């Protein structure tokens, strides 16, 4: 699976940090946004994403780019796309190579792959070794149960009409709405919450983009 690499992103929400995209084949077909609602299938992001299959890097060349990132630098893997896999089973060998390339750096990403036993092992190992993988969900209650049961960080997409900065799940777990979606002067480079693998709170992302009405229906 091919991956693009940008040393300094021009994306307002990420800020000037290294970012990547992985071709759409990396996305699990089980993702509820696979056929409709995916923010990365429209707008400028979609244009860049489509180019990955033509101009992207092979895996080993991508790893060299990761190793070129300055030590202690925050970076975001997969503004669009997901982890390499074989029929929905995350490729443990490739993720291990990514974890090793990331050592001394602060990489993070999200995955919509199913949390079966094999995938959970990969995610937990990655989080324990410095590269943060967040479980992506469509409900803060589901994210809460994942964090409680599996002890891994989780995020959730929420209705675009949410006007709160903080709230709690039914069990009392704190939910923090992504600061970059609320404050114009905040982005990934100045926030870094998603990279904290041992956090106790959920991060919520309000539906956005041209398909937000569809997303609202899915998350409701």
Image (cartoon, grey):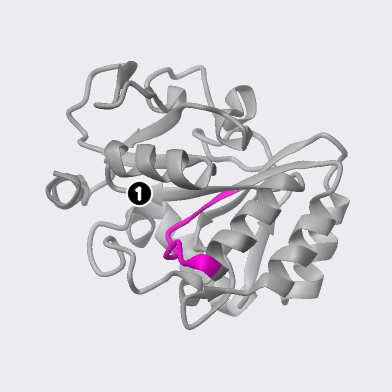
What residue appears at the point 30 percent right and 21 percent down from the top-left corner?
Answer: 168
- Residue 210 versus residue 163 in the image, above or below: below
The N terminus sits in image quarter: bottom right
- Residue 53 versus residue 109 in the image, above or below: below
Q: For the residue labelled by badge 1, is the local secondary structure a helix, a strand or a loop?
A: strand
The C terminus sits in image quarter: top left
Snapshot quadrant of residue 149? top left
Q: Is residue 114 magenta?
A: yes
Q: How many marks?
A: 1
What residue appears at the point 46 percent right and 67 percent down from the top-left corner?
Answer: 116
Snapshot quadrant of residue 94? bottom right
Snapshot quadrant of residue 74? top right
Across and down, in percent, residue 175 comes to: 37, 25
State the residue position of label 1.
137
Task: Classify 10 Å Cα crowding around label 1: few (below 14), some (14-19), many (20 and above).
Answer: many
Across and down, in percent, residue 165 comes to: 34, 16
Check the image and name the residue furthest to the bottom: 87
What residue appears at the point 63 percent right and 68 percent down from the top-left corner?
Answer: 3
Front in this rendered view, residue 9 or 26:
26
Across and down, in percent, residue 30 comes to: 33, 70
Q: Which residues are magenta?
A: 109-117
């Amino acid at each position: 699976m091919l991956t693009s690499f940008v040393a300094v992103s021009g994306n307002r929400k990420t800020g000037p940090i290294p970012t990547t995209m992985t071709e759409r084949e990396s996305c699990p077909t089980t993702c509820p946004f696979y056929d409709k609602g995916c923010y990365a299938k429209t707008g400028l992001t979609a244009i860049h994403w489509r180019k990955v299959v033509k101009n992207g890097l092979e895996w080993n060349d991508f790893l060299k780019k990761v190793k070129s990132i300055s030590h202690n630098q925050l970076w975001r893997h997969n503004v669009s796309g997901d982890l390499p896999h074989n029929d929905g089973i995350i490729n443990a060998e490739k993720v291990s190579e990514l974890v090793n390339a990331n050592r001394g750096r602060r990489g993070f990403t999200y995955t919509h792959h199913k949390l079966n036993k094999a995938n959970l092992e990969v995610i937990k190992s990655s989080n324990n070794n410095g590269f943060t993988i967040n479980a992506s969900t469509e409900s803060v209650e589901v994210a809460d149960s994942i964090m409680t049961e599996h002890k891994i960080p989780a995020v959730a997409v929420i209705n675009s009409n949410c006007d709160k900065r903080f709230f709690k799940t039914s069990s009392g777990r704190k939910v923090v709405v992504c600061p970059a979606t609320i404050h114009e002067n905040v982005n990934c480079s100045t926030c870094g919450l998603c990279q904290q693998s041992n956090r106790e709170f959920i991060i919520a992302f309000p539906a956005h983009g041209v398909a937000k009405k569809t997303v609202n229906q899915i998350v409701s």
